[in-house]
Image (cartoon, rainbow, N blue to C red):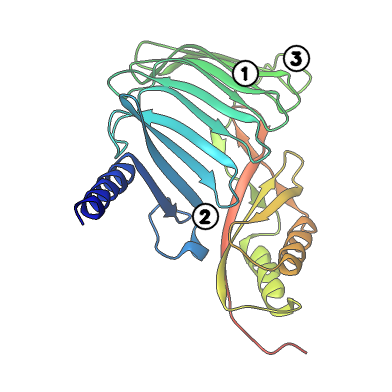
Amino acid sequence: MKKILLLIVVFICANGYSQKDSITSYLDRELKITTNKNEAKYIETIVKKDSLWEFALYYRDGKIFKKRFSKNNVGKKYVGKSLEFHRNGKLSKRSFYNVEGELEGKILTLFDNGNKNYTGFHKNGVPSGLWKYYHYNGNLAAKFYHDANGDIEKYILFNEKGEELKDDVYTKFRKPVFKKGEEEFSSKINYLMDNLSYAINTKIDINFIIDVDGSIRDVWVANTIPNKLGEEISNFFESIKGWEPAEEMNRKIPYIYSIALNIKTRVID
């Protein structure tokens, strides 16, 4: 009887320790914890690693999205290396946090094709010195020089061929725009909803990339749905033409677009 009681106590202690040093949560599209696993877009794991906690964020299908470290298990202050990844598994961003939880040192970002996106430096959380931005094809797009306050004091722009531009006007950031207007895009979504070959009563989170040429690629659904429905949705969005791509710091960039749809059960002929 004593042996059985001892085993129970050991199990409780071990189980309590594992729960304390390892936390798994399901997050929705706004990175908020949800109890509905089917509506989860991400899975977050928090694991004790020596004196730090490792925060790893995964897409619903298990692909890694982010990995960072913190001194506590609530992630109020990140320290050390921070990594982000594209859906294809390639590195998206590498940056560093100092002991105060501020971005510090060199930052490197890459496009999903492996080419550089932008590079720069932080000092106590503020952009510092020279930052370089690149076109999707790998050519230099801009040089921005920051003062001690992080403000841009000088810049040089280049076209997609790498030639310096005389026009000093640039767009800091602009989201992609559907050329025929939001109402027309909404009508296309309504058409999809009304013409699915079959429907299930659920909310799905659809994501896709609007490429630098305005085309749609890499459509994926965060939720678990039948393969046939997933293929139908993917083919539909990839067929949509007429996007003006996103712009940032004098170049066109790929942009991840997300949309949530409430599909209701209906009778299908």
Q: Which quarter of the figure has residue 238?
A: bottom right
Under mark 2, the amino acid is Lys
Q: Residues within 10 Å of mark 3 (few under 14, many from 20)?
A: few
Q: Position of residue 13 (x, y in %)?
A: 25, 45
> Circles 3 and 1: CB distance less than 8 Å?
no
Under mark 1, the amino acid is Ala
Q: Residues within 10 Å of mark 2 (few under 14, many from 20)?
A: many
Q: Which residue is mark 3?
A: 163
Spatial distance from mark 2 to mark 3, Cα to Cα?
42 Å
Which of the two discs, 3 and 1, labels the residue nearer the N terminus?
1
Which of the two discs, 2 and 3, labels the residue nearer the N terminus?
2
Q: Which residue is mark 1?
A: 142
Of badges 2 and 1, the one in the foreground is 2
Which of the two discs, 2 and 1, labels the residue nearer the N terminus?
2
Spatial distance from mark 3 to mark 1, Cα to Cα?
10 Å
**224 horizontally vs 70: left or right:** right
Q: Position of residue 139 (x, y in %)?
A: 73, 18
Q: Which residue is mark 2?
A: 41
Q: Give the structural element (helix, strand or loop) at label 2.
A: loop
